[in-house]
Amino acid sequence: MIMKDMILDRIKKVPPSGIRKYFDLINEMKDVISLGVGEPDFITPWNIREAGIYSLENGHTQYSSNAGFIELREEISRYLSRKFSLEYNPVDEILVTVGGSEGIDAALRALVGPGDEVIIPEPSFVAYKGCTGFTGATAVTIPLKQENQFKLTAQELENAITPKTKVVIIPFPNNPTGAIMSREDLYQLVKVLKDKNIVVLSDEIYCELTYEGSHTSIASFPEMREQTVVINGFSKSFAMTGWRLGYACGHRDLINEMKKIHQYGIMCAPTTAQDAAIEALQNSEEDVAMMAKEYNRRRRVMLDGFRKSGYSSFEPKGAFYVFPNIKSSGLGSDEFCERLLLEQKVLVVPGTAFGECGEGYVRACYASSMENIMEAMKRIRIFTDSLG
Amino acid sequence: MSEILEILEILEKNSRATAEEIAVMLGKPVEEVKEAIKKFEEENIIAGYSTLINWDRTEREKVTALIEVKVTPQRGLGFDKIADRIYKYPEVTACYLMSGGFDLTVIIEGRTMKEVALFVSEKLAPLESVLSCATHFVLKKYKDKGTIFEEKQTDRREQIFI
């Protein structure tokens, strides 16, 4: 038997992550300042960690119900209502998942298969395309543009929709561009989407990290509520990446089917993390605000640094990434990143890792100490000057 | 107003942050930040710039003691007059008026325990209004001014992750 031949083509066709090379390079290097990370540098606030410890001390080591502890789902429901005017019934409209990623996977598996099309704005988080590929559905990408501040426009969306379109992914605040969509921006999309047989998968994992105005969920438009599944989680907002905890909210019929996928594939999200998450939602507002404030300062410092090096960057207003245009360097994304790493020991991620249209851009993460960011910006300046 | 107070938040964490850096962090003109800092200094809101040093890790011996002091308040002057007599000693690094079982917390730094003990017995205790002193020596500083003194946290994150 040749194992390779046994594996489904549609699985093999999904390309591995485009950053393999950099893993190998950094493993041999010392003193690299990495702006290539994709998670907070803050440790989970102490009260949340302590709640996890208490959970273990009290012997909460069994399964929870498949959908997650009802207490947690109630807290999620209250949180979404309080912060984003979203109303979900904790009993049958909320599913606690292993990170936001599981929610994305389960939603796509429940909704699409061969012959269906999933619209994915790019550059964006790589899992959308990957998970779409696993289902056998076709990913239809929309290249977002810097001149539109990497927002998705109604026209672009309209042009991408075909009779086969089943799901549209709306990933804002966006990784890697840092773009956000205001209520007005979203309303333009709502006009295109309402009354169509298209489900919106709104990935709002970076919702707490919005630096201008406050985050709006597309599901908060009454006409969109039924046809939207909201993906969210604790990783970015509460600095809980390693806990692996997220949630999906939407129409009870969809959540019910996603729950089946979750039940057979996962059983339930880790109970220690669920107990900690209850504390996070009850008592961490101040910590969340403190982190967002600190990121905002770093955001300005990094943006200023890239601009002073001569790169035109649009101002990212969400998440914790800057996505500068590096075309003026005369280098391609990949070459820029590789040389910057080898010559100045600063790691940024080529924009192409997030879709072909990311060519000419790099992603730099400002979830790093101010000291590191300032030093990295100095080195990027030296690197740029050396290019002449 | 709260935006202006953010300047203080930044300086409290890092007094070496320059006006230029703070201006970038807050998205404000440098002049405005400089102006604000100058005003804070004039109004003694910024009362000084110091560095947090973990002396335990140097070869220099340093002893810190916390002294609970009970005093008799003076008519018309309350505790301020006697506090003033106490905090003027250069050995006193901090002095707080307290609620509860005693009146003043006095923090003393000296080179040796003996030096601190002598200060208490020869200078502090004999003061007329001082009724009693209870001296507690600090054995180890774990955390000071919001900073944990143990080994710095290393960054354990995956260096590249998308």
Image (cartoon, coloured by chain):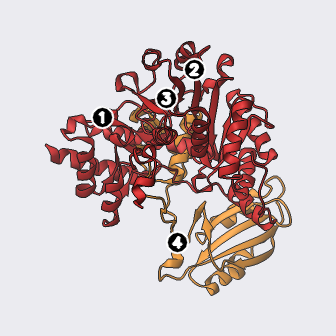
Asked if B51 appears above or below A231 in the picture, the reply is below
Q: Please tell me whether mark 4 sits on a helix, a strand or a loop.
A: loop
Tag 4: Cα neighbours inside 10 Å, few (<14), some, or many (≥20)? few
CB under 8 Å between callouts 1 and 3? Answer: no
Amino acid type at circle 2 is Arg
Amino acid type at circle 1 is Asn
State the CA–CA distance, disc 4 to disc 1. Answer: 39 Å
Q: Which mark is residue A183?
A: 2
State the CA–CA distance, disc 4 to disc 3. Answer: 56 Å
Q: Which residue is mark 1?
A: A325
The color chain B is rendered in: orange
Give the label, 4 or 2, closer to the camera.
2
* Percent of width and height locating residue A260: 70, 43
Is residue A67 left or right of A34 when viewed as pictured? right
Q: Which residue is rendered at x = 32% and y = 54% of the image?
A: A346
State the CA–CA distance, disc 2 to disc 3. Answer: 32 Å
Amino acid type at circle 4 is Glu
